Amino acid sequence: MKVFENQEVWFVTGAQLLYGGDAVVQVDGHSQKMVDGMNSSGILPVKLVYKGTANSSAEVTAVMRAAQGDPKCIGVIAWMHTFSPAKMWIHGLQELRKPLLHFHTQFNKEIPWSAIDMDFMNLNQSAHGDREFGHILARMRKGHKTVVGHWEDPKVLGHIAVWERVAAAWADAQDCLILRFGDQMNNVAVTDGDKVEAEMRLGYHVDYMPFSEVMTYFDAVEDSEVDSLTARYFEEYDHSPELEDKGSVGYRKVWNSAKAELTLRAVLKAKGAKGFTTNFDDLGDVNVEETGRGFDQIPGLASQRLMAEGYGFGAEGDWKTAALYRTVWYMSQGLPGGCSFLEDYTLNFDGDRSSILQAHMLEVCPSIAASKPRLEVHDLGIGVRKTPTARLVFTSKEGMGLTATVVDMGGRFRLIAADVECIKPQPLPKLPVASALWIPQPDFETGAAAWIMAGGTHHSCFSYDLTPEYWEDYAEIADIEMLHINSGTTLSEFKKELKINEVYYLLNKALK
Ligand code: MN
């Protein structure tokens, strides 16, 4: 899991000198053993770095300041081994703006009934100390995750692993540029929003890239590079042999797609961008067929492959979805299922099995494919160009997944996550695009209605690996609203939740 290699989570043990220096020395040894044990469990994707005991307000503040200032540190785990007066933590917690996890655990697993004495109590009193710490977090309204359980329990480590993945993706988003090739699709509301608020609240920065500048990268791509990428496509994907005929329209279209991919990757690398959006009405020179300068169609195949590589993607200028996809990809590195940008395409009413076809013109990530994608060239009659283009065609795996979106509610963001069941679609011989077919949970009528009432997008970021816990942790870190549509959702309760949340976020702003 390469993306996590240069990141660290700091583990800080809260203590005090009430029980004497010897007790703290022992606690320090316990803490080191715990951190070593958790690191060698193989469960945590980001390594823990033990930063010692913090025994006073000055020490807490110093270590929190250091955590805040160290670019490798993506978050802090705090554990109060014993009664650790939490007023010592006020200034330090005020300085820490990185994700925080409060770990309520204990070095000793079981009470040594026959041997327990007051010395043991002094070393194993987090039952007491973690409550004091929890109070100050509650009193300060300090966002955090609470994980409870013994540090050797794999289930407990699993909760920490989820938080680590979210914290790592959060750190990635704080240094993230999304490039927009073209603006939003005209008149679309849900893909629009406040980019200033997004940078303040969610971290990422959104810039516009004029096509005249994209063309300088386009012109710099060597034909030989395009030839070899085209050859790689033929090695990697199933395809009809006629596509390899260099005199055919099909070959030229695949070649053009490869040139678009090389152009976009060059731009993204040069600008240090982690995601991008496209717009089918803005593809460079309008006379591309004569001039050869510009994309002959939306760079669909390029978007599919760049998504699989980890670049955030949003169609039609949807920068919020591009940034969220990058986060989904980052969080799920090393997990087996795959993730993709998807769009609600068309409905299939079928009683209890009513479902929604998820697809796009072209841009679906091959990491969710049930089998090897097929490279095909077909007409595409939308947008500024009406010309055939290459794409990867496949259907998604069957199984449960979670899809998510962030919408701008005016003054604040709302995260909506929804459980969905991917089922096997019928063949789509006249719609040669990648697709998924899913049943929203708890059922089509309720799931779709809840998503629509919440103002959810037609674009979303889907994953087979993420669970609601990821989005809960993300929303806690970002301090934004989270709605989860699942098997227990009823519309009457969901409507109440929307109304109550509206009030909560108004008050939340006033309190802070
Ligand atoms: Mn779309």
Image: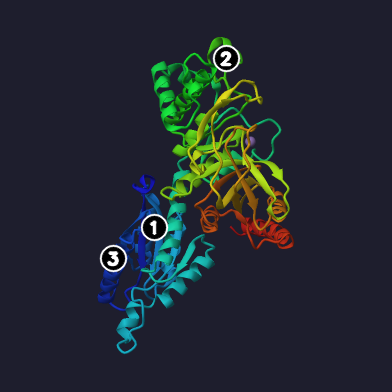
Residue 120 seen by the camera: yes
Reading the chain from its start, which is encountered first: label 2 or label 1? 1
Hey, what amino acid is under mark 3?
A: Gln
Residue 245 higher or lower than 354, as above or below: above
Hey, what amino acid is under mark 2?
A: Val
Q: Position of residue 353 (x, y in %)?
A: 68, 53
Q: Determine the quadrant in which ligand 1 lies.
A: top right
Reading the chain from its start, which is encountered first: label 3 or label 2? 3
Residue closest to the eye, 51 or 87: 51
Q: CA distance from mark 3 to mark 1?
A: 19 Å
Judging by the rendered image, the residue that carries numbered circle 3 is 32
Residue 211 higher or lower than 477, as above or below: above
Q: Nearer the viewer, mark 2 or mark 1?
A: 2
Q: Residue at x 44, y 53 (%)?
A: 165
Q: Residue at x 43, y 77 (%)?
A: 127
Q: Residues within 10 Å of mark 2 (few under 14, many from 20)?
A: some
Helix, strand or loop for disc 1: helix
Judging by the rendered image, the residue that carries numbered circle 2 is 288
Determine contact: label 3, label 2, CB under 8 Å: no
